[in-house]
Amino acid sequence: MSEKKFPEGFYWGAATASYQVEGGIENCDWAEAARAGRVPSCGRACEHYSRFEADFDIAKSLGHNAHRFSVEWARIEPTQGQFNEEAIEHYRDVLRALRARNITPFITLWHFTLPLWFSESGGFERKDSPEIFAKYCAFVVSRLGDMCEHFSTINEPNVYATQGWINGEWPPFKVSSKPWQRSYTGAMIKKRSKIWTLTNYFKVVKNLVKAHNLAYKLIKEILPNCHVSYVKHVHVYLKPKGFLNKIRQILSNHFQNHSFTKRTYKYLDEIGINYYQASLYGVELTSRKTDMGWNYTPEHIYDALVMMSRYKKPLFVSEAGIADYDDSDRAEYITKQVEGVWRALKSGIDVRGHMYWSLLDNYEWALGFDKRFGLVEIDYDTLERKVRPSAYVYKAICEANAVVE
Ligand code: BGC
């Protein structure tokens, strides 16, 4: 029997995001897009907003000692500059509930959804958006910083900008790619492409960089010892054959994996890594797919961690997971990617934790509720929670702080 042991104090847990699980958020851009019929409605989602205690009991029973969640900007700042203390009190209750169970919180300050007043006035295309965002972040940290040490400013800025300004699948639905193209679900869809949208894409990315850097400075004035990160979606592009494929790989790597971090790394204490898949230009890497149609490549989380280790910051896996309706692949997927994390540690990379995506089944953005990522299954008619068998495989890893074979 061999044992792949993790360092003492390693963080094990799962992640969620406010809009995807809480329910009842109506004053944000995604709710507005649903009212306009452009994305599925989120409605009550998992009602995690009122059921968080019971959900954390499940996380505790599954051996988790860490939990990543996001706070909802639209709840906290429903009108520009007017902060809602009731919402803050709610998130303090959430933090109390985690602490009572000895679960270390990792807060994400913004996970994709924007308050309507902000999105309707231009969102991250606004010149003053970095200041607006940084003020919001500083406010939240001033109110929650006594109960939490890990704050991520932005979840996946590249995915956000690509989906909103290149692919046009998410609010604000601007398209600047090929008129006929594959959506991220793999379907061929027709879109009205406007090449000048691309200038707005670059403007948004620039504002997101500024927003992070400014938020970092304001947060550190308030709480010098906390750990500030942003959460990076890392798509692993393996080394292809052929000149053109190599160029594609270099460009994708630059724009999707490195450009944001290169412009923010001075303002990062740690980096959250979201990993889902690897691909290889010119060749189908594997015919085995997840329910998202993504390559089944859990072991390449190792390459994602190696790639991001060049910034010499502590890393934590902030998301890694699989949509797997019948739970037939999830246990193996988890085990393989946790082994990948272990290999990264063995090669000297400073990885501090692993948070599976997701604790609960949830609202998978433009795809609605069909894709099932949860360790815990949700019956959307009754909202009953049912722990999936794979969750116990992960539990064994969390409790042993090791993969035992
Ligand atoms: C996002 C999550 C999403 C998950 C699966 C990540 O890119 O942060 O919100 O549900 O991927 O698609």
Image: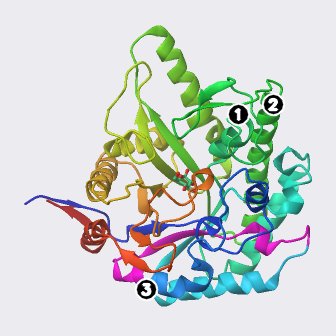
Sequence-wise, the earlier of marks 1 and 3 is 3
The percent coordinates of residue 153 (x first, y second) are 68, 59
The kind of residue tagged 3 is Asp
Residue 60 falls inside the magenta stretch: yes
Please report the bounds of the magenta region as a residue range. 57-81
SS for callout 3: helix
The percent coordinates of residue 146 (x first, y second) are 66, 82
Q: In this view, does 312 lie above or below 133?
A: above
Mark drawn on residue 57: 3
**Residue denoted by label 1:** 166
Q: Residues within 10 Å of mark 2 (few under 14, many from 20)?
A: some
The percent coordinates of residue 211 (x first, y second) are 78, 52
Disc 2 to disc 1: CB gap under 8 Å: yes
Q: In which quarter of the image is residue 45?
A: bottom right
The kind of residue tagged 2 is Thr
Residue at position x 75%, y 73% in the image: 140
* Quadrant into which the N terminus falls: bottom left
Residue 258 falls inside the magenta stretch: no
Residue at position x 49%, y 90% in the image: 100
Mark 2 and mark 1: span between their CA atoms? 7 Å
Mark drawn on residue 197: 2
SS for callout 2: helix
